Every structure is written in structure tokens, then in C-alpha cells.
Image (cartoon, grey):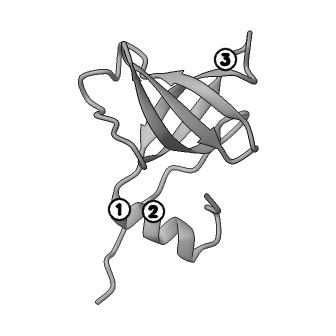
Amino acid sequence: MEIKVGKIRIPKGNEVFGLVEAMLGAGRSRVRCQDNKIRICRVPGRLRRKMWIKENCIVIVEPWKIQGDSRGDIIWKYTNAQIASLRRKKLLNL
């Protein structure tokens, strides 16, 4: 049975895929990004009540302009069907 997934958002510009490794408290989480960097990320205030993050979620991370190698914002969270589609298309290798 094929699950149809509409348009799937992919990273653009300096955004990268990430895997949430741990929840650190105070709205922060440790994310292993696809560019082999571990960043401390937060969910911006405009998305905080709309997006609930747990461990092992696949997300899009936007690195900060300052401290971009160690900090970032989580701007998108994928569903399980979207993750499966990204893996089939070989866009995701986390």
C-alpha cells in the first residue's frame, strides 16, 4: 500500500536535516545535523505551540548567523510518512 505524500519541504539555503538526540530542557534540544555537526537548537516562539519535538524526530535546522556551528533553530518537523518518502528518494541519510 502506497501512502501518498504531498509536497515535502526540503532544506534550502543554509538549512540542514537533523536528528534530535536529546531533550535538554528549557526548550532546547541537542540535534545531530547532516553536515556532521551537533547543534543546540530551540524552537522559535512563533512555532513553539504548533510543533512538539521528541527524541528521534527528523527536523530541519536553520543555523544561527552567529555561532552557526553550535547553535540553531528548529523550523520544520517531518511526519513518519514524509521521513519514509525522503529515505526512498535518498535525500535523508541520518
Q: Residue at x 45, y 35 (%)?
A: 22
Mark 3: secondary structure = loop
Q: Name the residue under label 3.
A: 64
> Mark 2–mark 1 contact, CB under 8 Å?
yes
- Say what secondary structure mark 2 lies in: helix
Q: Where is residue 53 in the image (x, y as percent from the top left)?
A: 34, 36
Residue highlighted by disc 2: 83
Which of 81 and 22 lies nearest the eye of the viewer?
Answer: 22
Measure the C-alpha gap from mark 3 to mark 1. Answer: 27 Å
Residue behind mark 1: 80
Q: Where in the figure is residue 9, as x and y percent of width and height?
A: 50, 50
Q: Residue at x 54, y 40 (%)?
A: 60
Q: Do the residues labelled 2 and 3 touch (CB within 8 Å)?
A: no
Q: In this rendering, is residue 6 above or below 47?
A: below
39 and 84: which is toward the camera: 39
Task: Judge the density around disc 2: few (<14), some (14-19), many (≥20) Cα neighbours within 10 Å.
Answer: some
Q: Which mark is residue 4?
A: none
Q: Distance between the residues labelled 2 and 1?
A: 5 Å
Report the amino acid beneath label 3. Answer: Trp
